[in-house]
Every structure is written in structure tokens, then in C-alpha cells.
């Protein structure tokens, strides 16, 4: 336990390759190339399809590049696709999703990190019982909790409000996030904690002055997990709010699942890519931190 | 470690205050919600939850319904295959990427991106790729292999494997990242020592590295298994449970009972069976894993 | 939602006395082309009265239903919502969540104008009326593509038997004889149409009305299962999921025909096809001329806001006004709920439906006879039956009998 956390170690740790053009390297890169192509294939299909017109999609082969590139499906998906009477595409839902995601992510992370901190460093009697229940809670299918939560939110006067939805996301993000934070904080060197105690720092002082600054990677991981989960949520968004706060996924569902006579695949694809852009951006931006953060949190479980 | 920490009750007041959200959530939402569900599973609740007692009727009906039995079987097949394959694929990918390769960032991102896309998307795209009329089958046939057949989603016996292909594509990136992180956490000296002793790389992985990565496997296990138990969106987006009832899963049975059949009681009975199974496995495991003071040395 | 309510309250005060404009949220799952156009007519009429229709459309009946029940039990009801009338709403009424609109019905004289009167009956619980029926939908239609039969070089069939006999020719021409979506409700619907059309009336009523296991296991129903097996063979190449995608196969001439309710007509209209020229419709499959009278209705939750309650009253009354009925039903492809209006602008197919309605050649809809639970069990049976060609007629019928005998 006295070793520094592995975040400080950077770079691959496996056996070192030697020559550049060895048989081993050809095998290695060949395998990786095939795998990468396999993973990228659906994205490729989505992108080329979203750039085609409907006549070309109907006759064509889903893998062929567009003969005539059109951005109309993207424009339509964003601002014109219809749901019932409203023909505003994904654009309205986008800002609602932002309004839902930001507070939900922040609140759920603050609460889960405090839980994890208490569990790891200030363990009190019975803490593990609650933690076990929390882990059990991670397995409950969301749909089952739909009505009990409606009743709870109603009693709290939060039903139908943005606050209620934020609370629901906080509750359902809690099990996995608490597990992540608990493991991470346990892995931090004990000396730091002891020194701070000697200096007279208390629960909150240590949390804000030592734990948070040392845990940026795990906060990044948590942000990524939560942004992905909350941004893509459909069920809670549609059940716990009203039409004026419907998230983007409600529009996405309406675009993809209602066909105006002909299924407009190009618009469906454009709509799905647009919806996925926000979590994707978060990944690209924080890719490096993501890996390091998980390393520290999970390895020292 | 924790035993050395302040143990007097009042010292821990702040920790208890900080843990209030967790305690409230655990007791009121998860325990409360579960008890509520179990209570109402003994009732004849239809569109609305109502306390009209019917004893074990819902359970008798549940276990005599073929769709439920098929659902369990599918979850078992899907769960077992996913669990094995996602760990094998995730670990091998991580080991390959860990060979000081070039373009690591790009490759890692490409393998991880499916996790960013919602299941509504994933299911739809794979529905396409696996559609015999314009997907992979058509492409291969257009290359001249006329008898090539690849339509898992349209063949009842293997449809669940069609779902598996999409599920693995979606989930293995996250496992890969976790495994890679675990590998990065292994002390370099371990590799040096193994090389000096002349132990082949695969043996080093299997008998030294993997046992050292136990914590990473546990975190990953929780993430993966919760995903499997709750699988629903992917099925709905990709197959709708079809062809026939070939790809039905328990979470979808619950959803269908509740919102399609307006039979909440039946849905609660099904989810009680799911939760019971989970509880029987998770609670003893969690107590061993996290309970007591033996988790830290 | 709360801020919206505050805003509404504020505007209500500002507008005070006069007939103020009120926003009313209306929830429905009509999102496909023809449906959206039809609901647009209702919105237009409501907006013309000075109020604002706040459209809340959610694709798919299941999530929509989950939202409706949650909003009602959560104490945040919408202004009005679409539901199938019949037995689905019984519990909401018992729980006192829905507004009793008997006074509106009496003021507007619905009892005298709604035809058939069974529609109003299924809105009625203990003598009180709780919903406004807006249309009549019937299931018993066979839609035929003229292009498909022309391409196959044969005459358009005039009844079910000819349709079955023509199937091999269509298959030779590379066409799908019968388009069918792979969803349970479509497939059980098809079966029920076969039962209504191919065997005498009383079989349908004994099975679904009296829940007679004896009749369900009898020879007549066995014949229906045989016809269903024919349909299964004819639809074996149809891989689409949604009903309107199946309809689209008929519109584009890729499939010979489809058994689907009259709402399919809306899709033909959106595709600018003309009844009798581009497509034909056979009520009762051209065998037994009759229709079932299901349909859609709007329910009105109990609201605390007086302004909104008043707007509900206006909306409910408006829905059955002759002009609204004509505009809405022409777009939706359904029949109006009142027999006293002029629908000469209706097309060939709707005229056939109107004629049957006038003749009283009617059956109740399954939604009015069986619970959604039983309905779902039947859907599951047929989704299995139609997907698995190896499922025998006898096994399927045995299961059908067991579902019917346990039905309430």
C-alpha cells in the first residue's frame, strides 16, 4: 500500500517488441487492422447512408459510398423531421438534453464521490450493508422502479419537474459510481490522509484539499459514464418530464420509430449520429484520462 | 486501513452526513422499491397498482408461460456467451494494444466508440447489416458466392446470436479499456522477473498477470453482469423479440407485461423472480467481497 | 412543467374574464404520415377556437401508455389523451382519475348522434360517460395492389379464395403474395379478421364475447387456423416489422395484398394513390360483408385548473362536431362516429365502409370484449405461429383454447 498509485506510470507495460518488420509485428498490426475495421464498419455504414438520397438507398448497397453527396438528411434530422405535429427535428430536444445532463452529471458525481469517500476512508458501522444494497440496486431493471418512483416523486412534489428527473438519474447512477469512487479513494496512499489528520484537517477538509485534487482522472471516468448514460436515456426522460422538457432521445425515438409512409433511412442515420455526437466528443477529448483514471480506480479495488 | 481510522462515533458524524444520500437511496429506493414490487406481485394489479390479493396466481401463470421460459433460456445463452466472450475479447484486445503499438489512441477510440451510441442506434444499424436483403449476405453474394447465407436475425434458432454480435460490438470496448488499464497497473518488474525465469508470455499472462488483475475483473464483472441482466433496449431496437419469440428476454417480458398487457402484477412477479435470483448471487458475493475488514491489508 | 403551470396561471389572470386562450396538452401516439395529418385537423380546429393545442406525440403505444399512467398517478395530468376505448381505461375510471363528461355528452346530444351506439357504450361506466369517441376503425379489410397483379399478369382477386389461388402466380413474378408486419398485434388482428370473415358471425361472438372454450376448440375455428396457415405460407417472404412498411409493399407493388385495418388507407392517401385505380379494398375479405367497430377515443383527466377544464369541455364538444369529424376522418381513413353527416367526398373504400355502417353489418371490436392482458397472450401466440412454419395448426389451436378459457 505504500507504492504510489499507478496513474503516475505511463505507457504500455507489456513485453517490448524488438524489430520493426518482424513476423510478430505483421501479425500484430494485421490483427489490429482487421479488428478496427470490424468495429468501424457500422459507423461507416451509418455515415455513408446519411449522405445518400432515398432513391440511391433503395437501389443501392449499404456499403457503397454515396454517388451524390447530400447533406439534406442531416439538415432534416436536425431541424425539420416531424413527430406528430411538431416538425422541428432534434434541435428542440438537444437543449433539453443539455439541461438535463449537466445538472444530473454534476449532482450524481458529487453525491457518489462523497459516498465513496465515506466508504473508503471513514467507514462507519453498517456502511457495508448499505453499500451491498446499492450494488444489488445496480441489477434492478429500471422499468420495475418506474411506478414506485412516480409515487415517491409525487410525494416529494418533484414529479414532472426537471429536478425530479435529475434526482432519478442521481439515484440510478449511484451504485456503479460509488463502486468506482470507493475503489479509487481506497487506493490513494494512506500517508497523505494521515498527514492531513495530523494537521487537523477533518472530513470535508481532506475531501476538498486532498481527495478531489488527486482524483481528477476518476472524476473524468465518472463524467464519461454518466454523460453516456444520461444523454442516451429515453425512458426516464419521457416518463418523468413533460413535453417541454423532453430530451433529444424522445425526438430520436419518434423520428426512427415512426415512418412517414417510407422509412427514411438516411434521416434515421443522420439523427442517430447527431444524437451520439455529444458523448463521442467527450470520449475524444478525454480519451487519455479515461484510461488512466480507470486504471487507478479499478486496479486497487 | 480503515480500522486505524477514527472509530469513535461522533468523529464520524460528517461521514454519516455525507452518506445520507446513499443510505436513503439504499433503503427507500432499492429496498423500498423491491419490497413494493414483491408486495404487488401477489396482487391482481392491471393498468394501475392495486392491492387486490390473488396469492401465487401471478407466479403460476408466469412459470406456465412459454415466453417467460424462452426469455430465461435466452438470457442464459446470451449472458454466458457475453460474459465469456466480452472478457476474452476485451482482454486479448487490451493485451494486443499493450504491445507498445503505434496509433494506440486511434485504435482504442475506434473500439470504444460504440459505447457512446445509444442502443436504439446500435440495434438499428446491426438490423441493417444482418438483413439478408441489403446487408452482409447481399454483399458477399454480389461478389459471386451465390449460396452464402448469413441472416441470423431471420432464423429463429440462431437469432439470439445475431443479438450477441451487436451486444459484443457495443460492450467489448469498455471492457478492453478496463483491462488495458489493469495491464498498465501491473508492475514492470513482474515482466522482467518472468522473462529472466524463461516463462513464456502466454503463461505469464495466464498465471501471473491475470491473478494480479483480480480487482479490475471485479469492477468489470459488476458492470458487465448488470448490463446483461437488464438487457432490453438492444432487443427492442434490433429484433423486437422476434422472429416469433426467439429473442425474448426477461426484462422485455417485464416491460411487455406492464405496459403492453396492462398486467402490472405479472410484470412484478417476473421482476421478483429476476431480483430474487440476483439477490441470491449478489448479496453473499458482495458480503465476501466488500464486507468485514478483510478487503484491505 | 411547474413553470409552465405558473406561466399559464399568470396568463390566465392577465386575460381574466373573457374566453381566454388556454394551452392544453394533448397526448397521442399517432406519428405515422396519415395519422399525423389527421391529428393535425383536430389541432387546427382547436386552435381556431382560440386555444392552443400542445402536441405531445410519442411513437409507440407502450411508452406512450407508460407515460400516461405515470403522469396520471404522478399528479401531473395532461389535458387530454388518446386511448383505445373499451376495457383498457376501466381502471383509470375506477380510480377517479378521469373526468366524467356526461354533461358535455348530454349538452351536445351525443346519445342521438353517435352511430353505432355501442361506441358510446364503451365509453360508459355505471351510466356515466368518460370519453369522446372520434372515429370508427374496422379491421376487416384486404388491401390489394393493382400494380402487383398487373405485373403478374392476372386479374385483381375479388375475395379471399381468389387471393389465395393467385398467390403462386405472384410468387413466380418475384412478388410477395401477402405483406405482413412481424408484430403480434398485426398477426392476431389478421387471425381475427379471418375468423370474422370466413366462418359465421356467432363463432366470433362465442369465442371473444362468451369466452367459450368449446367453440374455440371446435371445427369452425380449426378452419380459421387452416386459413391462417395459408396466410403464413403466403407471407413467408415478408420481412418488414411495421404495419405501414407492409402497407408500403402494397403501395409500391412489391406485395399483392395486406390484411390491415382501415387506417392503412391513410398511407395510400399520403402516397397519392386512388382507390379503385391503384388499389382495391375488400371489406370482410370479400366473403362476409361486415365490419367491427373499434376506434379511438379521447379521455380527459380530472384537472384542478378551471381554465383548462373549460378548454377540455370545448375540445370534447369540438371533436364530435360535423366539420371536425369530416376533416379528421378523411385524413385518418376511418369512419365518422355520427351517421348524420355528408361524406360524399369520401373515396371508394370509405363509401363501402359507410354503406356497411348504415346497414348495421357490424361486430364489436376485440378491444371491447377482451382485456389487454388476454389480447397480449393471443398476440404472443400468433407471433409464434406466424414466425415458425413448423408450429402445427393443432398445437396453436390448443393453446388458443387455453388462453380463451382463462380469459375474463
Image (spheres, helix red, strand yellow):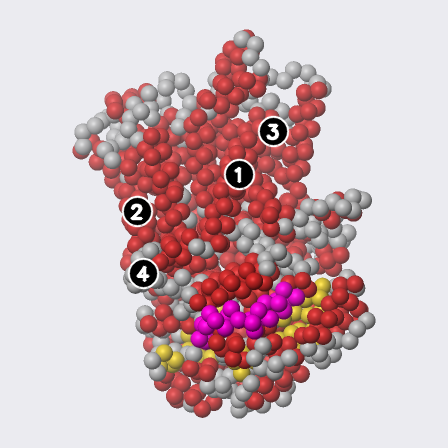
Neighbourhood count class around disc 4 (C-alpha, 10 Å): few under 14, some 14–19, many 20 upward: some
- Residue that numbered label 3 is attached to: B104
Of marks 2 and 3, which one's residue comes earlier in the chain?
Answer: 2
Neighbourhood count class around disc 2 (C-alpha, 10 Å): few under 14, some 14–19, many 20 upward: some
Q: Which chain carries label 2?
A: B
Q: Quadrant of the N terminus of chain C?
A: bottom left
Q: What stretch is highlighted in magenta?
A: C208-231
- Viewer-side residue, B294 vs C153: C153
Number of on-image labels: 4
Residue occupying image coordinates x 31% and y 44%: B26
Placement of C260 over or under C359, stated as above or below: above
Placement of B56 over or under B140, stated as above or below: below
- Residue that numbered label 4 is attached to: B54
Placement of B278 over or under C190, stated as above or below: above
Of marks 3 and 1, which one's residue comes earlier in the chain?
Answer: 1
Calculate the distance from the C-alpha at mark 2 to the C-alpha at mark 3: 44 Å
Residue occupying image coordinates x 74% and y 79%: C277
Residue occupying image coordinates x 32% and y 41%: A133
Calculate the distance from the C-alpha at mark 3 to the C-alpha at mark 1: 25 Å
Tell whether C311 sits left or right of B75.
left
Whether residue A115 is visible here, answered yes or no, is no
Neighbourhood count class around disc 1 (C-alpha, 10 Å): few under 14, some 14–19, many 20 upward: many
Residues tagged by mark 3 and mark 1 found on one chain of the structure: yes
Tell whether C126 sits left or right of A67.
left
**Magenta span contains residue C213:** yes
Calculate the distance from the C-alpha at mark 4 to the C-alpha at mark 1: 38 Å
| Label of residue B31 in the image | 2
- Residue that numbered label 1 is attached to: B82
Q: Which chain carries label 3?
A: B
Amino acid at each position: 500500500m505504500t507504492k504510489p498509485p499507478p496513474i503516475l506510470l505511463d505507457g504500455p507495460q507489456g513485453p517490448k517488441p524488438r524489430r520493426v518488420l518482424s513476423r510478430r509485428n505483421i501479425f500484430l498490426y494485421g490483427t489490429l487492422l482487421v479488428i478496427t475495421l470490424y468495429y468501424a464498419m457500422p459507423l461507416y455504414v451509418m455515415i455513408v447512408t446519411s449522405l445518400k438520397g432515398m432513391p440511391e438507398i433503395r437501389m443501392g448497397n449499404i456499403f457503397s459510398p454515396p454517388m451524390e453527396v447530400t447533406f439534406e438528411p442531416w439538415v432534416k434530422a436536425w431541424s425539420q423531421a416531424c413527430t406528430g405535429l411538431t416538425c422541428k427535428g432534434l434541435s428542440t430536444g438537444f437543449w433539453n438534453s443539455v439541461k438535463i445532463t449537466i445538472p444530473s452529471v454534476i449532482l450524481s458525481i458529487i453525491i457518489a464521490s462523497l459516498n465513496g469517500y465515506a466508504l473508503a476512508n471513514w467507514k462507519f458501522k453498517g456502511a457495508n450493508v448499505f453499500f451491498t444494497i446499492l450494488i444489488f440496486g445496480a441489477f434492478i431493471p429500471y422499468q420495475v422502479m418506474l411506478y414506485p418512483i412516480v409515487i415517491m416523486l409525487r410525494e416529494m412534489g418533484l414529479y414532472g419537474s426537471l429536478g425530479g428527473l435529475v434526482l432519478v438519474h442521481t439515484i440510478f447512477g449511484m451504485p456503479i459510481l460509488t463502486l468506482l469512487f470507493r475503489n479509487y479513494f481506497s487506493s490513494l496512499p494512506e500517508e497523505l490522509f494521515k498527514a492531513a489528520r495530523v494537521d487537523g484537517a477533518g472530513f470535508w477538509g481532506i475531501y476538498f484539499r486532498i481527495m478531489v485534487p488527486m482524483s481528477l482522472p476518476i472524476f473524468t471516468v465518472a463524467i464519461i459514464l454518466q454523460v453516456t448514460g444520461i444523454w442516451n436515456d429515453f425512458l426516464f426522460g419521457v416518463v418523468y418530464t413533460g413535453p417541454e422538457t423532453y430530451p433529444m432521445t424522445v425526438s430520436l425515438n419518434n423520428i426512427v420509430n415512426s415512418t412517414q409512409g417510407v422509412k427514411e433511412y438516411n434521416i434515421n442515420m443522420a439523427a442517430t449520429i447527431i444524437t451520439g455526437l455529444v458523448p463521442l466528443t467527450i470520449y475524444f477529448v478525454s480519451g487519455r484520462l479515461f484510461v488512466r483514471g480507470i486504471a487507478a480506480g479499478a486496479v486497487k479495488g | 486501513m480503515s480500522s486505524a481510522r477514527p472509530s469513535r462515533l461522533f468523529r464520524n458524524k460528517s461521514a454519516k452526513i455525507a452518506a445520507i444520500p446513499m443510505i436513503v437511496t439504499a433503503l427507500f429506493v432499492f429496498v423500498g422499491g423491491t419490497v413494493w414490487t414483491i408486495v404487488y406481485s401477489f396482487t391482481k394489479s392491471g393498468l394501475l397498482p392495486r392491492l387486490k390479493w390473488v396469492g401465487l396466481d401471478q407466479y403460476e401463470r408466469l412459470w406456465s408461460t412459454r415466453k417467460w421460459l424462452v426469455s430465461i433460456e435466452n438470457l442464459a445463452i446470451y449472458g454466458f456467451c457475453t460474459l465469456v466472450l466480452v472478457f476474452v475479447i476485451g482482454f486479448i484486445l487490451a493485451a494486443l494494444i499493450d504491445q507498445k503499438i503505434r496509433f494506440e489512441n486511434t485504435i482504442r477510440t475506434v473500439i470504444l466508440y460504440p459505447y457512446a451510441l445509444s442502443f436504439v442506434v446500435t440495434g438499428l444499424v446491426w438490423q441493417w447489416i444482418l438483413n439478408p436483403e441489403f446487408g452482409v449476405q447481399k454483399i458477399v453474394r454480389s461478389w459471386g458466392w451465390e449460396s452464402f447465407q448469413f441472416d441470423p436475425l431471420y432464423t429463429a434458432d440462431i437469432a439470439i446470436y445475431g443479438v450477441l454480435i451487436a451486444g459484443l460490438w457495443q460492450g467489448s470496448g469498455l471492457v478492453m479499456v478496463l483491462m488495458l488499464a489493469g495491464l498498465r497497473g501491473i508492475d514492470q518488474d513482474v515482466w522482467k522477473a518472468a522473462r529472466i525465469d524463461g516463462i513464456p508470455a502466454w503463461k505469464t499472462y495466464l498465471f501471473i498477470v491475470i491473478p494480479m488483475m483480480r480487482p479490475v475483473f471485479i469492477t468489470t464483472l459488476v458492470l458487465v453482469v448488470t448490463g446483461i441482466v437488464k438487457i432490453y433496449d438492444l432487443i427492442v431496437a434490433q429484433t423486437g423479440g422476434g422472429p416469433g419469440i426467439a429473442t425474448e428476454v426477461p426484462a422485455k417480458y417485464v416491460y411487455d407485461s406492464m405496459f403492453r398487457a396492462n398486467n402490472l402484477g405479472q410484470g412484478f412477479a417476473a421482476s421478483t423472480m429476476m431480483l430474487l435470483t440476483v439477490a441470491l448471487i449478489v448479496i453473499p458475493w458482495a458480503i465476501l467481497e466488500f464486507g468485514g475488514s478483510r478487503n484491505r491489508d | 412543467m411547474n413553470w409552465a403551470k405558473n406561466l399559464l396561471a399568470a396568463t390566465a389572470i392577465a386575460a381574466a374574464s373573457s374566453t381566454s386562450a388556454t394551452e392544453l396538452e394533448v397526448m397521442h401516439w399517432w406519428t405515422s404520415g396519415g395519422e399525423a395529418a389527421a391529428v393535425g385537423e383536430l389541432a387546427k380546429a382547436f386552435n381556431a377556437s382560440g386555444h392552443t393545442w400542445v402536441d405531445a406525440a410519442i411513437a409507440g403505444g407502450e411508452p406512450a401508455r407508460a407515460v400516461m399512467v405515470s403522469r396520471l398517478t404522478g399528479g401531473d395530468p395532461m389535458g387530454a389523451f388518446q386511448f383505445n376505448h373499451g376495457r383498457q381505461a376501466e381502471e383509470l375510471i375506477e380510480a377517479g382519475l378521469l373526468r366524467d363528461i356526461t354533461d358535455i355528452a348530454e349538452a351536445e346530444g351525443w346519445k342521438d348522434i353517435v352511430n353505432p351506439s355501442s361506441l358510446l357504450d364503451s365509453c360508459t361506466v355505471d351510466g356515466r360517460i368518460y370519453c369522446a369517441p372520434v372515429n370508427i376503425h374496422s379491421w376487416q379489410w384486404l388491401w390489394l395492389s393493382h400494380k402487383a397483379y398487373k405485373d403478374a399478369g392476372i386479374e385483381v382477386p375479388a375475395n379471399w379464395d381468389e387471393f389465395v389461388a393467385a398467390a403462386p402466380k405472384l410468387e413466380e413474378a418475384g412478388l410477395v403474395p401477402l405483406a405482413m408486419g412481424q408484430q403480434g398485434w398485426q398477426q392476431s388482428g389478421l387471425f381475427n379478421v379471418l375468423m370474422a370473415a370466413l366462418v359465421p358471425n356467432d363463432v366470433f361472438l362465442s369465442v371473444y364475447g362468451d369466452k367459450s372454450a368449446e367453440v374455440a376448440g371446435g371445427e369452425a375455428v380449426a378452419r380459421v387456423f387452416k386459413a391462417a396457415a395459408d396466410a403464413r405460407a403466403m407471407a413467408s417472404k415478408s420481412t418488414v416489422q411495421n404495419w405501414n412498411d407492409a402497407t408500403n409493399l402494397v403501395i409500391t407493388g412489391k406485395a399483392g395484398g395486406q390484411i390491415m385495418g382501415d387506417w392503412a388507407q391513410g398511407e395510400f392517401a399520403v402516397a397519392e394513390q386512388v382507390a379503385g385505380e391503384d388499389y382495391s379494398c375488400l371489406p370482410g375479405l370479400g366473403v362476409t360483408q361486415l365490419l367491427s367497430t373499434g376506434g379511438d377515443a379521447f379521455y380527459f383527466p380530472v384537472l384542478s385548473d378551471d381554465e383548462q377544464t373549460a378548454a377540455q369541455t370545448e375540445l370534447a364538444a369540438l371533436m364530435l362536431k360535423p366539420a371536425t369529424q369530416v376533416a379528421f376522418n378523411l385524413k385518418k381513413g376511418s369512419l365518422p362516429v355520427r351517421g348524420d353527416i355528408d361524406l360524399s367526398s369520401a373515396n371508394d373504400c370509405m363509401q363501402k365502409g359507410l354503406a356497411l355502417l348504415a346497414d348495421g353489418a357490424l361486430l364489436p371490436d376485440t378491444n371491447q370484449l377482451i382485456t389487454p392482458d388476454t389480447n397480449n397472450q393471443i398476440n404472443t401466440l400468433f407471433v409464434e405461429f406466424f414466425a415458425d412454419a413448423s408450429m402445427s395448426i393443432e398445437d396453436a389451436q390448443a393453446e388458443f383454447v387455453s388462453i380463451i378459457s382463462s380469459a375474463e
